[in-house]
């Protein structure tokens, strides 16, 4: 019997992944990984999640292994997360967590446990292709997680199972209820463990010092003072603490740009202000899940999770980066986030967004 180690998080998705694999005849082992040291204020739910994972493993009569990857997480994910914020960018730690931890050190740990395959409860599909395994979107478009998985290696993808890729979330909960799994109605987790439900700005302030500077309109008028560029993201409305000004329209203000040289936060009025839009962007070096020629030319792009596919043209740059030109300008394209590339259902890879380009005539 072939062995599969399932990343058992204590949630309903990984529980049903284990349930389905056991029904298929696999020798299923669960692996609960702790990626963050327990905090003192109770925002991290790892202790309760482990108890839920134990209950699931007991119900399924499978072994459960527990391991801490906290040191690796801090070095490979969290330090990058903090350094990017200090530089004024907005990173996405979930992408790095998947590449470095779940499909990195955890997969290798699973192999030491004798696993022939590693499985997760992600809503995505691993599909055989003519040149190796392909990453495809999950069938539940509202839960598809391929965006967060685009940076894992193809070799790791070849050893991975994602049993929920064909399912709707409602069907997953129904299966869990029918099987008597104790987490069938457990709410989905939100965010990442080291932040939990706590206020993001308060958490970040423990690691990134405040560096106050001016909040300015696009024509240079000072409207207020920000706490530090690290604490704001493009397109943000809440938390600016600036009111209206004499003679101005009664419209909300949004972050349009960060001038790191002057430590200035540039804001504009109105959700659809032209300065919130980008006609193109420059990325860092891309990570390919497909041979690059499959993507060059026209494909679809997401610049944030849950965004609909956006038609675009890819232009490879001499230094190995990509220029992505959108058919329609995109709102709040954010340095530090990821541009992820698709051809239909297939995820082709992606890259970190470095520089948004304004439409012709735009400036900030």
Image: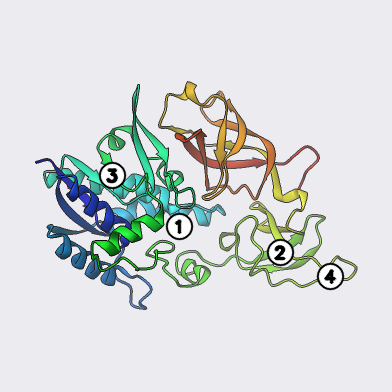
Q: Cβ–Cβ below 8 Å for labels 3 and 2?
A: no
Q: CA distance from mark 1 to mark 3?
A: 21 Å
Where, by quadrant of the figure, is residue 4 drawn?
Answer: top left
Of the residues under marks 1 and 2, which one precedes in the sequence? 1
Q: Cβ–Cβ below 8 Å for labels 4 and 1?
A: no
Of the residues under marks 4 and 2, which one precedes in the sequence? 2
Point 63% across, 55% down: residue: 234
**Badge 4: residue crowd in 10 Å (few <14, some 14–19, many ≥20):** few
> Which disc is residue 82 wearing?
1
Of the residues under marks 1 and 3, which one precedes in the sequence? 1
Q: Which residue is mark 4?
A: 245
User: Comparing marks 3 and 2, which lies closer to the viewer?
Assistant: 3
Q: CA distance from mark 1 to mark 2?
A: 22 Å
> Which disc is residue 214 wearing?
2
Where is residue 246? Give x, y as percent. 88, 71
* Figure check: 198 above or below 282: below
Q: Secondary structure at mark 1?
A: helix
In front here: 302 or 73? 302
User: Comparing marks 4 and 2, which lies closer to the viewer?
Assistant: 4
In front here: 54 or 20? 20
Residue 173 appears in view: yes
Q: Which residue is mark 3?
A: 104
């Amino acid at each position: 019997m072939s062995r599969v180690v399932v990343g058992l998080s204590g949630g309903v998705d990984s529980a049903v992944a284990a349930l389905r694999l056991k029904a298929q005849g696999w020798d299923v082992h669960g692996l609960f990984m702790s990626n963050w040291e327990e905090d003192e204020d109770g925002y991290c739910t790892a202790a309760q999640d482990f108890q839920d994972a134990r209950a699931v493993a007991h119900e399924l009569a499978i072994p459960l292994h527990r391991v801490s990857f906290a040191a690796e997480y801090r070095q490979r994910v969290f330090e990058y997360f903090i350094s990017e914020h200090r530089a004024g960018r907005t990173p996405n730690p979930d992408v790095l967590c998947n590449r470095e931890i779940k499909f990195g050190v955890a997969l290798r740990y699973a192999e030491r446990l004798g696993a022939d395959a590693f499985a997760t409860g992600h809503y995505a599909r691993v599909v055989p292709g003519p040149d190796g395994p392909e990453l495809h979107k999950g069938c539940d478009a509202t839960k598809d997680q391929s965006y967060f998985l685009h940076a894992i290696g193809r070799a790791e993808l070849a050893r991975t199972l994602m049993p929920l890729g064909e399912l709707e979330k409602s069907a997953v909960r129904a299966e869990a209820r029918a099987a008597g799994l104790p987490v069938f109605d457990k709410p989905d987790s939100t965010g990442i463990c080291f932040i939990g439900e706590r206020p993001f700005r308060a958490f970040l302030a423990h690691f990134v010092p405040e560096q106050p500077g001016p909040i300015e309109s696009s024509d240079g008028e000072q409207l207020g003072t920000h706490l530090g560029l690290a604490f704001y993201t493009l397109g943000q409305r809440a938390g600016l603490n600036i009111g209206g000004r004499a003679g101005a329209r009664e419209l909300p203000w949004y972050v349009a740009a960060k001038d790191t040289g002057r430590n200035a936060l540039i804001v504009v009025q109105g959700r659809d202000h032209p300065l919130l839009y980008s006609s193109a962007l420059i990325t860092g070096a891309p990570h390919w899940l497909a041979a690059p020629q499959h993507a060059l030319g026209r494909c679809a792009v997401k610049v944030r999770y849950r965004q609909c596919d956006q038609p675009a043209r890819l232009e490879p740059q001499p230094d190995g980066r990509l220029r992505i030109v959108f058919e329609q300008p995109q709102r709040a394209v954010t340095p530090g986030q990821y541009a992820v590339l698709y051809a239909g259902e297939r995820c082709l890879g992606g890259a970190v967004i470095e520089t948004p380009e304004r439409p012709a005539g735009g400036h900030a």
